[in-house]
């Protein structure tokens, strides 16, 4: 019998039992009530409780069995497992029906089950975070068992090319060994992020100031969707734009000034990434500026300040924590941005401050390491997780600081819109 | 006195000028941002619109015995290099299916090679010498023209640009999003309901809240690492499948859905809850019968936005292997598949110039879908928005 058919049968059996539970329990409750007994709950609630008692334990048992099978590697035939859980469902049905008594709080019992289910769902987010941490840290540890941590942090050469020879037991055949010095990768990442920020922060902030302080409502209604569209463009599309349109323009312009630029220069992905981040900064800053109480503006204007003086010396200082928080979030996005740099930046680790040269970033190397045809245990593949770990820690710190700053802003002005 | 008055007037003028300058600068920034968008869309249209047209040429196809063995023999020697190899490959199969074709010769409009296509679209250097002369002759005789490119919408990926299409990627995207939606919509809404309506204000709740905000800002590529290490290596989910891609995207979209659902729930005034409590509803009854139905438009809007975001995501999917070469439309959730953004990424890496056009064409389709999704979300919000 095919596995799909077994699953189908299982679902059918469970559905049948659930229906049986519903109607039997409701019938029993209705009869009890008709006989004149005062009950704590409505018949429908008893019915739903019986359904929960039937399906809940059965599904739990099935999931638990599957999990045990995966974790311990014990082979339980699917048919047995599902039969067992159908038996459990039948027992649950029986117990559920027994509980249809006038002194049983069916409604509160349902409430408890639902509360538990909701709380379990809420725990998913914590499980995800731990999943990320666990998966990255465990593989990163394997990497650092092969390569020294110190070389990883301080080394200036990243050449994993020969690591597959080493893993094939033919170390030393290539030139030198594999070297995993991550400094050039981080230098490239920071340079490209810096270029992006130089584009995004001034443009985004000024656009936010215009929308919050100057723009007539009509312009605002028009500009918001435009920025939203800009924010909704997939990064792979930005990457294509950077590689096909912007990079050649930069090479031409550089050539006009007598400079030599690579087609994989850092400027193209940096600028395009900046464009991508503009709506992010402008919408967050717009919210923050709008949250500054009007009384402060009015006070300043009443003293005879012009509008720009009010913005510069009252509104902006007041909203500074929020703007910094937005900028930090933007930096964290720029550091973790993948597709634009994969498509438009180079592959060659290059320690330089010249944005016209090609250079690579952390995310590019992660993608390169994991899309190659290496076996999973090779040092190059595992290096992706070490790089991912650093990326995770850095973005985590940036996010935390950003959250703290926005909280300070919120507490100061007691606004709940952020 | 009058001098200081003049001074003040001059100063005031300067201050107002400065004020106007800030206004113009900030307006300029907004215009710049809008200009970026228009340049970008214009560039994509210029590059991508030709992809919706494809060259076809009218040639004499002779269904001979020889052609069923060696397909190129079906067309004349002079146009052999101009007809798509993909078309020629189909000839033996067609002859098997329609035996009456054998021995006939007919004029047929056939798919042209991508070099002819590029030549017709104005890239004169795509063809050289004798081939260019043949094509010129065909054009003069009205036997070569650009027609609407249905292949682009019905075919999967191909190494031959004239045969490459987005169908398999589109199906892959839909299947991946189904998995994503099935996982993250219930879990996300349940989490949001728990945090807004049920959770006690304790350490654990705060931890969950911080966590969700954090997850929303984790770089997407790290979700790919999680998918690779946990789903593929630990749970043994098939690599490159819509299942693993969808599950990875679900974790990434979860915070978006939670955050938007929470704000939708928060916008329901407390009076409604208190009225329901007042007539004796339990907490779950309040949520099920009053809060959820009232906040449903907001939740749907948030889910659509989350889906649009997941649809455009590429980086985590590359890590879990969804950049595979998929020529056929897949049928199962565990078979290898690719998605639209990954297809765009693959094509962008092809050296053939004809693929630049395909890439931009794919981008236009993707953008059209994304923008209409977002527009639907905005429309929903506008239509059902209620001020309490």
Image: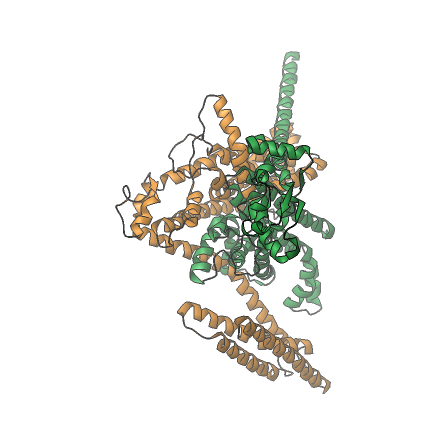
Chain colours: A orange, B green
Q: Is residue A28 visible?
A: yes
Left or right position of B353 against B235: right
Quarter location, residue A150: top left
- Position in image of residue A43 (x %, y %): 68, 78
Along the line of sight, the residue nearer the viewer: A154 or A163: A163
Q: Is residue A276 visible?
A: no
Q: How many marks?
A: 0
Left or right position of B286 against A198: right
Along the line of sight, the residue nearer the viewer: B161 or A8: B161
Along the line of sight, the residue nearer the viewer: A134 or B88: B88
- Position in image of residue A201 (x %, y %): 54, 35
Decide: is B252 above or below A65.
Answer: above
Q: At 66% from the left edge and 34% from the top edge, which residue is drawn?
A: B139
- Of all residues, the one furthest to the left in this rendering is A172
Left or right position of B314 against A133: right
- Position in image of residue B353 (x %, y %): 54, 37
Decide: is A27 above or below A391.
Answer: below
- Of all residues, the one furthest to the top in this rendering is B3
Q: At 64% from the left edge and 22% from the top edge, which residue is drawn?
A: B17
- Position in image of residue B282 (x %, y %): 65, 69
Decide: is A55 above or below A401.
Answer: below
Left or right position of A344 against B156: left
């Amino acid at each position: 019998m095919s596995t799909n058919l077994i699953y189908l049968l299982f679902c059918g059996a469970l559905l049948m039992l659930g229906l049986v539970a519903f109607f039997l329990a409701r019938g029993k409750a209705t009869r009890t009530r008709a006989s004149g007994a005062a009950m704590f709950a409505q018949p429908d609630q008893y019915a739903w409780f019986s359904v929960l008692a039937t399906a809940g334990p059965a599904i739990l048992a099935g999931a638990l069995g599957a999990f045990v099978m995966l974790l311990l590697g014990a082979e339980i035939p699917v048919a047995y497992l599902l039969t067992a859980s159908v038996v459990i469902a039948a027992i649950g049905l029986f117990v559920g029906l027994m509980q249809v008594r006038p002194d049983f709080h069916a409604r509160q019992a349902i409430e408890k089950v639902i509360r538990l289910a909701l709380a379990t769902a809420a725990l998913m987010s914590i499980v995800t975070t731990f999943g990320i941490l666990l998966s990255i840290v465990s593989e990163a540890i394997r990497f650092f068992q092969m390569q020294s941590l110190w070389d990883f942090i301080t080394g200036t050469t990243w050449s994993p090319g020969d690591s597959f020879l080493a893993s094939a037991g033919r170390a030393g055949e290539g030139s030198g060994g594999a070297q995993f010095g991550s400094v050039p990768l981080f230098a490239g990442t920071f340079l490209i992020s810096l270029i992006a920020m130089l584009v995004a922060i001034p443009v985004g902030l000024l656009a936010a100031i215009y929308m919050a302080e100057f723009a007539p409502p009509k312009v605002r209604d028009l500009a918001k969707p435009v920025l939203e569209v800009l924010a909704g463009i997939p990064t792979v599309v930005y990457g294509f734009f950077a590689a096909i349109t912007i990079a050649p323009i930069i090479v031409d312009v550089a050539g006009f000034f007598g400079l030599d630029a690579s087609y994989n220069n850092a400027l193209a992905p940096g600028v395009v990434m900046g464009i991508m981040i503009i709506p992010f900064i402008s919408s967050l800053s717009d919210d923050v500026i709008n949250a500054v109480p009007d009384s402060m503006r009015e006070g300043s204007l009443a003293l005879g300040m012009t509008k720009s003086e009010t913005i510069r010396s009252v509104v902006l200082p007041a909203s500074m924590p929020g703007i910094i928080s937005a900028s930090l979030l933007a930096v964290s996005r720029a550091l973790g941005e993948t597709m634009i740099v994969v498509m438009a930046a180079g592959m060659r680790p290059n320690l330089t401050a010249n944005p016209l040269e090609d250079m690579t970033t952390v995310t590019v190397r992660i993608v390169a390491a994991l899309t190659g045809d290496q076996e999973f245990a090779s040092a190059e593949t595992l290096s992706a997780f070490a790089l991912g770990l650093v990326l995770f820690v850095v973005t985590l710190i940036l996010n935390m600081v950003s959250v703290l700053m926005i909280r300070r802003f919120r507490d100061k002005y007691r606004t709940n819109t952020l | 006195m009058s001098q200081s008055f003049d001074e003040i007037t001059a100063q005031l003028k300067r201050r107002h000028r400065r004020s106007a300058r800030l206004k113009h600068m900030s307006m300029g920034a907004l215009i710049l941002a809008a200009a970026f968008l228009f340049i970008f869309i214009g560039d994509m249209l210029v590059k991508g619109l030709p992809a919706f047209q494809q060259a076809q040429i009218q040639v004499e196809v002779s269904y001979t015995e020889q052609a069923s063995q060696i397909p190129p023999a079906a067309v004349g020697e002079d146009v052999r290099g101009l007809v798509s190899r993909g078309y020629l490959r189909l000839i033996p199969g067609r002859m098997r299916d329609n035996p009456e074709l054998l021995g006939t010769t007919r004029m047929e409009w056939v798919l042209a090679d991508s070099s002819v296509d590029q030549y017709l679209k104005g890239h004169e250097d795509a063809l050289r010498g004798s081939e260019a002369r043949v094509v010129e002759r065909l054009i003069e005789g009205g036997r070569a023209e650009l027609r609407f490119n249905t292949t682009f919408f019905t075919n999967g990926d191909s190494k031959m640009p004239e045969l490459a299409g987005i169908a398999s990627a589109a199906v892959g995207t839909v299947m991946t999003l189904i998995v994503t939606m099935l996982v993250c919509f219930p879990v996300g809404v349940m989490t949001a309901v728990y945090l807004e309506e049920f959770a006690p204000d304790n350490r654990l709740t705060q931890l969950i809240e911080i966590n969700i905000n954090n997850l929303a800002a984790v770089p997407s590529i790290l979700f790919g690492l999680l998918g690779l290490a946990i789903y593929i290596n630990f749970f043994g989910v098939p690599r490159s499948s819509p299942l693993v891609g969808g599950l990875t995207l679900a974790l990434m979209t979860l915070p978006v859905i939670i955050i938007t659902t929470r704000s939708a729930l928060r916008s329901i005034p407390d009076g409604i809850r208190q009225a329901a409590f007042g007539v004796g509803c339990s907490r779950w009854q309040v949520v099920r019968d009053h809060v959820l139905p009232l906040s449903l438009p907001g939740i749907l809007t948030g889910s659509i936005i989350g889906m649009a975001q997941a649809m455009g995501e590429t980086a985590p999917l590359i890590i879990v292997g969804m950049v595979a070469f998929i020529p056929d439309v897949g049928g199962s959730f565990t078979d290898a598949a690719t998605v639209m953004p990954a297809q765009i990424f693959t094509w962008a890496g092809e050296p053939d110039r004809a693929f630049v056009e395909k890439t931009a064409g794919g981008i236009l389709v993707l953008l059209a879908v994304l923008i209409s999704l977002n527009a639907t979300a905005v429309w929903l919000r506008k239509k059902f928005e209620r001020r309490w």
